[in-house]
Amino acid sequence: MQKTRILVTGGAGFMGSTLVKRLVAEGADVRVLDNLWRGRLANLTDEHGRPVIDLERQFRLADLTEYSKCLELVRDVDLVYHLADVVAGIDFVFSHELFVYRQNLAINSNVLAAVLQNRVPQYVYVGTACSFPKHLQDQPGIVALREDQTYPAAPESAYGWSKLMGEYEAELGARDGQLSVGLLRLHNVYGPGATFEPGRSQVIPALIRKAIRWPEEPFVVWGDGSQYRDFVYVDDIVDALLAVPRRGMGQGVIQIGSECPTTVRELAQMIVRISGKSIEPQFDASKPSGDRGRIACCERARAILDWRPRVTLEEGLARSYAWTERAMMDAAREPG
Ligand SMILES: NC(=O)c1ccc[n+]([C@@H]2O[C@H](COP(=O)([O-])OP(=O)(O)OC[C@H]3O[C@@H](n4cnc5c(N)ncnc54)[C@H](O)[C@@H]3O)[C@@H](O)[C@H]2O)c1
């Protein structure tokens, strides 16, 4: 029997590479497209540094904002997991809004157009909780959001808008019945493989880096620490991604999160505990901290995908800390 041929865009990135490793382990025929804007080929290696795919044959360095490239490379597969987009920390996202918006619109539109033109039968897209309207995330108390609350649309950031348009365009692409579309909307994903370098990293990898480098780098937490998020471990995301083609196609948006609110202050304290150091977090309220808070309501994920998160935040943070320590040591050993 022929293996399922799967293309993962953004497959050298954090989530993409974790998905690729699982797909390879399950025996799929996997290809990866990435321009390495934030992804790294090192993400596509195992714990011994050996590539998990044949990089000559199964990896293509390509910029998906170029339609001719998409048309040439997004083809001859049974399923596309489209994970490539410009994603970064809050500082980058808010200081490069036009760039993020235009890049993501171009990437998402090109990949979907190539999928349709090349008659790829299945397309899976990942949206973000940043697409929910800002006013819903600024309410007092803990706010659990449902999938249908993204409209009327009013995301806080250009990133949130661009990802919402990616969901919308994917749904349009499914309308004539030729393409089967699966849509996940993810809350804050963390885990081994996440970018931790200053400038482009998200809150968990950034705080882990600061704890490892402390006291050379101060342990500064952006905002007053009261903002809360729904953190979900990358392996749990991969479980959901694998469940989509089996159960979640044509079902509309399915939200994925832990349903647990964690403030950034609590997060910082947990990371300090794992570090074993006597760090006193410094809160910098002058830095951007994003919306006040949001968590997912995952009824649809349970009902449709039979999905539940398996990794606790404590366990996931400990694994992420250990991975980041090793990755920072490896990076320090690299010449030049
Ligand atoms: N990390 C999160 O918390 C989170 C939450 C919700 C949704 N998402 C979505 O999940 C997907 C994966 O995110 P991630 O956290 O793994 O980020 P990531 O940055 O590690 O992965 C994205 C990949 O896309 C690649 N890319 C960017 N521009 C490209 C281009 N023009 N052409 C080809 N490749 C390009 C990057 O090099 C990177 O490898 C993204 O679509 C993101 O919007 C992420």
Image: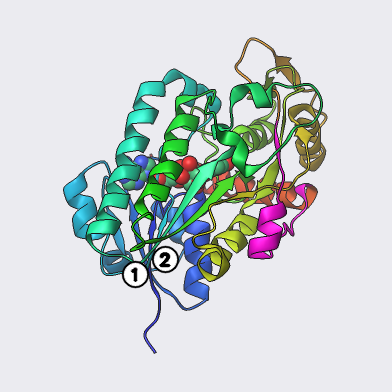
Mark 2 surroundings: few (<14), some (14-19) or many (≥20) residues within 10 A = some
In the picture, which quadrant includes the N terminus? bottom left
What residue sits 72% from the left and 46% below the top?
A: 317
The quarter holding residue 265 reads: top right
Marks 2 and 1, how far apart in space?
7 Å
The quarter holding residue 44 reads: bottom left
Pointer 2 with pointer 1, Cβ within 8 A: yes
Q: Does the magenta stretch include residue 311?
A: yes
Instruction: Tell me, for residue 51, which label it has, or none.
Output: 2
Mark 1 surroundings: few (<14), some (14-19) or many (≥20) residues within 10 A = few
What residue sits 49% from the left and 49% below the top?
A: 126
Image position of 203 with respect to 187: above or below: above
Queried on whether the Cβ of the residue with tag 2 lies below 8 angstroms from ligand 1, the answer reads no
Left or right of residue 13, residue 294 in this image: right
> Can residue 90 be seen in the rendering of this structure?
yes
Give x and y (percent) for residue 35: 31, 46
What residue sits 70% from the left and 33% below the top?
A: 294
Specify the segment rendered in magenta. Answer: 294-313
Q: Which amino acid does label 2 sit on?
A: Pro
Give x and y (percent) for residue 118: 23, 62
Q: How is the image coloured?
A: rainbow
Q: Which residue lies most toward the bottom here? A: 1
Q: Which residue lies most toward the front here? A: 176
Give the residue pinned by disc 1.
54
Give x and y (percent) for residue 209: 62, 35
Q: Does the magenta stretch include residue 11?
A: no
> Can residue 39 be seen in the rendering of this structure?
no
